[in-house]
Amino acid sequence: MSSIEITGKNVADATAKAATELGVDAKSITVTILDEQKGLFGKSTVKIRAEVADAKPKKGAKPKAAEVVEATPEAIVEAPTEVVEESPAPAKAKRGAKKVEPAKAVVEATAQPDGEEDEERAEVVATEEDETAIAAIVAQLMESGDLDVQVEETSRQGKYVNVVLDGKDAAHLVGKHGEVLNALQYLVNVMLTQKRKNGVRATIDGGNYRRKREEALTKLATNIANEVKKRGEEAVLDALPAFERRIVHKVLSEIEGIGTYSEGEEPNRRVVIAPSE
């Protein structure tokens, strides 16, 4: 196999040059594009590797591994068995075996709730000690930030400790669309992961923002779910934090003919509302 590397204005031009250089017809050349650069005003250059097979091997002579030869039935039988296989075809199902519908399997695989919901399956339950510790952590953060905010109320629900804040500066903790409150909640949960390491999580509210947000999410999700049922088409909500996705999953689980699942990666993970049979 003879080969050269050559540059031209385009592939055809470079191939023609290579044919002249090798002294063969352009049709007998195998071309591999090595580099292609486009310049200003449409000017471009292409670098190729041109290869041409040498004279055919004599009758009976064994071809080298790098040579391209015509495959005869005998050659196929005697060819080395070291090959790279593609993905194997699925084995035929035995008679009577239960079939799994591909589309349904995909939905079941992706329709698992978010990581927050998965953790609930571990049956972590917050204790009174957890509640006291979390209230102390939040109070310390408020004091460190020199904020006139107090822990007004705490409660437990499963693995969650709910902390309600109130005070002169409580309104500053909400921020636009709850961004400051979400950031504070995230910080507290990071601290809990390092200090308690038992899977207990905190939810933090101030100025009744969480309650109002839950009501708004419930209304929005319900309205969209009704439209999904009418049209028979999926709908995708805007990206939501995990605890808000959990609200949507819970609310829509009670609506017949509707299913939900989440897709995407944090912080752009979204709830998909889909019609179900």
Image (cartoon, grey):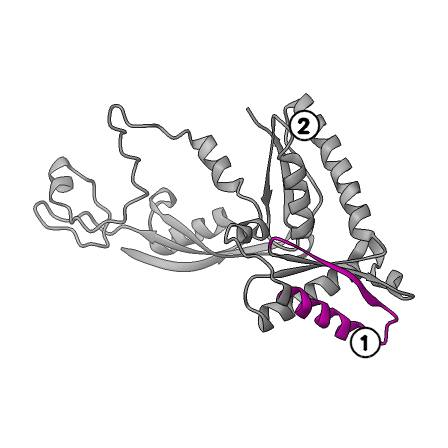
- Residue drawn at 64 percent across, 42 percent down: 271
For label 1, the SS is helix
Q: Residue furthest left?
A: 60
Residue 152 on image: x %, y %: 81, 62
Q: Closer to the camera, 195 or 2?
A: 195
For label 2, the SS is helix
User: Quadrant of the image for the C terminus?
Assistant: top right
Q: Is residue 187 above or below residue 46?
A: below
Residue 184 on image: x %, y %: 74, 65
- Residue drawn at 41 percent across, 52 percent down: 32
Q: Which mark is residue 143?
A: 1
Residue type of the residue flagged with mark 2: Val
Residue 104 on image: x %, y %: 47, 31
Q: Closer to the camera, 26 or 67?
A: 67
Q: Is residue 217 above or below residue 44?
A: above
Which class describes the residues within 10 Å of circle 1: few (<14), some (14-19), or many (20+)?
Answer: few
Would residue 239 be found to the left or right of residue 209 on screen?
left
Residue 140 belongs to magenta span: yes
Residue type of the residue flagged with mark 1: Glu
Would residue 89 be found to the left or right of residue 270 on screen?
left
**Res. 267 image quadrant:** bottom right
Q: Nearer the viewer, mark 2 or mark 1?
A: 1
Q: Residue furthest right?
A: 168
Residue under pointer 2: 228
Which residues, given as a range, are shown in magenta? Answer: 130-158
Which class describes the residues within 10 Å of circle 2: few (<14), some (14-19), or many (20+)?
Answer: some
Q: Closer to the camera, 102 or 252?
A: 252
- Residue drawn at 16 percent across, 51 percent down: 63
Q: CA distance from mark 2 to mark 1?
A: 47 Å
